[in-house]
């Protein structure tokens, strides 16, 4: 079952580029977005597991 995002917050906006924060539920999958590019990830709680094709990994809070 897919979960909906719990919330997002706009952090900055420079016209052509917008920076947002996304709050996720445990086990939630986020589908690709044709215009979104993850430039930096900050994990504040728990573990974030990610994958891109054959590459995968995880980031823990505070890393």
Image: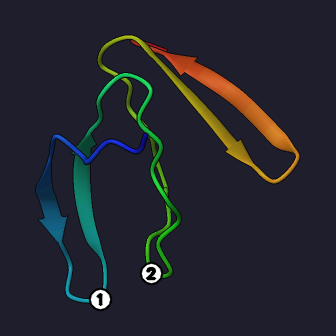
Across and down, in percent, residue 23 comes to 23, 37
Q: Residues within 10 Å of mark 1 (few under 14, many from 20)?
A: few
Across and down, in percent, residue 43 comes to 38, 24
Report how far apart the C-alphas of labels 2 and 1 lie in the structure. 11 Å
Q: Quadrant of residue 36?
A: bottom left
Establish if 23 lies above or below 43.
Answer: below
Dot 2 falls on a residue whose secondary structure is loop
Across and down, in percent, residue 37 comes to 50, 67
Dot 1 falls on a residue whose secondary structure is loop
Residue at 23% x, 57% y is 20
Establish if 32 lies above or below 46.
Answer: below
Q: Residues within 10 Å of mark 2 (few under 14, many from 20)?
A: few
Residue where numbered disc 1 is placed? 16
Drawn side of residue 63 relative to residue 18, left or right = right
Residue where numbered disc 2 is placed? 35
Of the two numbered discs 2 and 1 on the same chain, state the one appearing first in sequence: 1
Residue at 26% x, 48% y is 4
């Amino acid at each position: 079952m897919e979960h909906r995002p719990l919330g997002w917050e706009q952090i900055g906006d420079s016209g052509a580029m917008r920076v947002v924060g996304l709050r996720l539920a445990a086990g939630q999958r986020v589908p690709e977005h044709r215009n979104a590019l993850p430039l930096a990830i900050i994990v504040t709680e728990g573990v974030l597991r990610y994958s891109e094709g054959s590459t995968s990994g995880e980031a823990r809070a505070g890393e």
